[in-house]
Amino acid sequence: MVNISGLAIHFGGKYLFEGVSATINFGDRIGLIGRNGTGKSTLLKIIAGVEQASEGNIHFPKEFSIGYLQQDIAVNSDKTVYAEAESALVEIKKAESLIIHLTEEISNRNDYDSKEYLSLVQKLTNANDRLKILGGHSAQADVEQILLGLGFMRNDFYKQLSTFSGGWQMRVELAKILLAKPDCILLDEPTNHLDIESIRWLEEFLKSYPGIILLVSHDRKFLDIVTNRTIEISLGKVYDMPFNYSRFMEQREQLREQEIAAYKNQQRQIAETERFIERFRSKATLASRVQSRVKQLDKIERLEIEEVDSSEIKLRFPEPPRSGRLVVELKNLSKSYGDNLVLNNIEFAIERGEKVAFVGKNGEVKSTLTKIMIGSENYLGDLEFGHNVSIGYFAQHQAEMLSGEMNVFEVIDNAATGDMRTKVRSLLGAFLFSGDSVYKKVKVLSGGEKSRLSLAKLLLEPVNFLILDEPTNHLDMAAKDVLKRALMEFQGALIVVSHDRDFLEGLTQKTVEFKGGKIKEYHGDINYFLDKLQIDSLKTLEQKTKIINEIEPPKISENQISREKRKELQKEENKLNKLIEKCENEIAIFESEIAVCEKLFADPEFYSNQQELIKVQEKYKILKNDLDSKMQLWEELQENLEKITAGLS
């Protein structure tokens, strides 16, 4: 158990937060949330012992261990990936060294009945027990499992860590924390440098972790899946509830409504009191009553409410110039770095108004293809743009192209046209620039601030083809909402490279997976893609594959097929038709049941019964997944039927 009591921190006499008190128990998986600048990362640093609190204290149990992953780390290591990860097993190495030492000492003695010999045997037994508790006998397997889970390939294990990018080095630091198995894990934006598959693996790992987890993240999905408790820092206050992020926000909204009502009521009382004081201040007969009201006003503890959430700000891209139907088309496109072929005969096209997500493990050259499209990388093959296509591009390095001598306000004000000129302050506020910060010179901004400013500027450009490479890395949830709403209303074509599932959900209509130099298209959003990945690993797919294999048509010879072969094919054709008919009947049933659920959802009164609502929502989700699976099976059965029909014709 960890006890936090009266914790506060202030800079220049102003409190970042104060009076933070909480009891944290083993098994708590806490999401620490709040706007940028509220002190979330600072609180993690205080718990980790990196910084000191201005007031208050934290009491830890005896021999309490903490693993802390910062947002930005500098790794200086000449070790291999595997060796650096393995270096976290300090306690295991100590236990192994002690066992070796004791074993050697015992082997060199023959005084088997002496107290010293028996003492050494007991120490060796205790050391082996300790090693077993630490998991020493499975340590190598754990190192491999965690490195693979975080996205490394086996052939990466013995490469120098220094040859990897900062994002991959961060993964090794995360692996070291997970391998050390501390009592408390502190994670500051752990998903920033992870791909979707690695994030899902980390979610499963953390869900079953027996110790304390305290994490800062702007990834709603990650918070919902991992956490069972949420702590929000807002206006220096703390709101602590035993819910994951989504449940917390529902409860928090209700609490916020109560706070607003109390604030308005207090403001009304203050206004009435001030009017009374002003009206009767000069009347001697009422002097005592006026003084009483003045004292009463001084004693009031003024309530505060958080500023209006920036996600409420409505921003739109300028009307884009109309392009041709085809925006861009790639044919037999390949890309190599020396002998390393990273893209192999890619075929891809995007049409006007189409929104596409690029996903895949880090290192699968998603960004490389976007750079090819904007002309900053060479390639082999064909790439053609349609009529009147204008491109807007965002990547982290684009921020460096901003003029360093301009201030934040000037950058946006110069780019704004029409109605947007009146919304410059709102736009800057949505991307976390407020007060005097809008007059900071670009050259003194941090990397994250420059990225946010570059992204805000992009919202003002009249283009019809947007390419965004990891646009959400430096945005909080409110700013992400602003960007997502604007993109959903954007009339042009969009390609977005992202690992943020919540951001992608409902934004795109097509998902393109990059794997091994090839791409595979999924006609649906990120949830459809993830559902397919799950189906691909379940027994349902194995059963489906078995069906397909049973009815797989033999290859048709160019020569005339024999009479017996024709009979065999006709038999398979009949079997396929029956399976297709059965499949279509099941699809019709699913669609009918889905329609019933959707009819209920359209009835406002239905939402009054929360228990029934949750039940129907779960059923609806299952039905949709079953329908998708059945539709995929139907498509594959139809493909096989077409092959057989072609063979018989």
Image: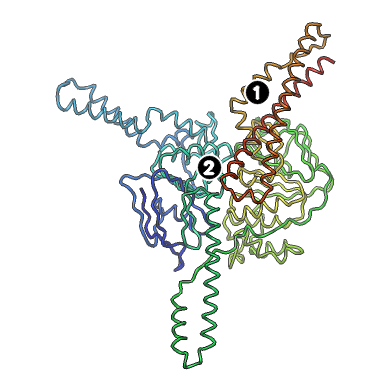
| 393 relative position to 23: left or right | right
Position of residue 49 in the picture relative to residue 612 (left or right): left
Label 2 crowd bin: few (<14), some (14–19), many (20+), radius 10 Å = some
Question: Residue 341, located in which quarter of the rendered image?
Answer: top right
* Secondary element at tag 2: helix
- For residue 264, say whether it is visible: yes
Vertical placement of 310 versus 582: above or below? below
Tell me the residue at 26%/27% (across/down): 125
Residue 449 picture location, percent across and down: 59, 57
The residue located at (62%, 62%) in the rendering is: 429
Q: Nearer the viewer, residue 291 or 435?
A: 291
Q: Position of residue 113 (x, y in %)?
A: 15, 22
Read off the residue under disc 2. Answer: 225
Which one is earlier in the sequence, the residue at label 1 or at label 2?
2
Residue occupying image coordinates x 38% and y 27%:
137
Q: Which residue is mark 1?
A: 544
At label 2, which amino acid type do we have? Ile
Q: Quadrant of residue 478?
A: bottom right
Residue type for callout 1: Lys
- Percent x, y of residue 118: 18, 26
Q: From mark 1 to mark 2, how far is it between C-alphas?
A: 29 Å
